[in-house]
Image (cartoon, helix red, strand yellow):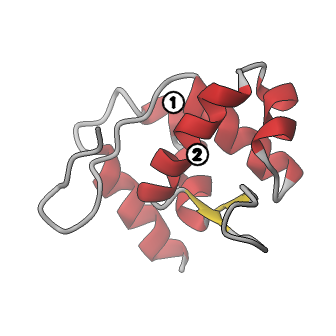
Amino acid sequence: MITNNGWGMAIMRLRRPTDFLILEALDETGRNVATNLESHTGKSRQNINTRLPALADYGLVRKIGPKERSGLYEITPKGQAVLAHRDEYRRVEDFEQLIKNEVTTTS
């Protein structure tokens, strides 16, 4: 279940290492689908298909079509910032604020 942070956005609760592996694979390969991400991450397609919508809710990836059910995703600038700061995920008090500042600074 994804909860709301009061600003209409999902509170970021990432699963390690799965979510970071998905972001890394999308960053390296570009647009991709769960079947291909399975081979890049070593995680099951079912697991990836569960995590991609959650990552989209966090704004880290976006579904790009061409059809609604195509399952084609790409990493967003926010997702790239999360990937760049992954070592700090459990260490900083407000990881979401760190990422927000990073994305705002580089935009």
Q: Quadrant of residue 4?
A: bottom left
Task: Categorize mark 1 by other alpha carbons within 10 Å: few (<14), some (14-19), many (20+).
Answer: few
Q: Position of residue 59 (x, y in %)?
A: 47, 61
Task: Categorize mark 2 by other alpha carbons within 10 Å: few (<14), some (14-19), many (20+).
Answer: many
Placement of 67 over or under 54, stated as above or below: below
Q: Quadrant of residue 36?
A: top right
The kind of secondary structure element at disc 2 is: helix
Q: Residue furthest left?
A: 6
Is label 2 or label 1 in front? 2
Q: Position of residue 21 (x, y in %)?
A: 68, 31
Residue depicted at 60% across the width and 46% down the height: 84
Q: Position of residue 107 (x, y in %)?
A: 53, 80
Q: Position of residue 56 (x, y in %)?
A: 51, 56
The one of 7 and 63 positioned closer to us in this rendering: 63
Placement of 60 over or under 3, stated as above or below: below
Residue with the mark numbered 1:
87
Q: Earlier in the sequence, mark 2 or mark 1?
A: 2
Residue with the mark numbered 2:
52
Q: Is residue 50 left or right of residue 21?
A: left
Mark pair 2, 1: CA separation: 21 Å
Q: In the picture, which quadrant includes the N terminus?
A: top left
Looking at the rendered structure, the kind of residue marked 2 is Leu
The one of 13 and 43 positioned closer to us in this rendering: 43
Placement of 33 over or under 36, stated as above or below: below
Q: Tell how many labels.
A: 2
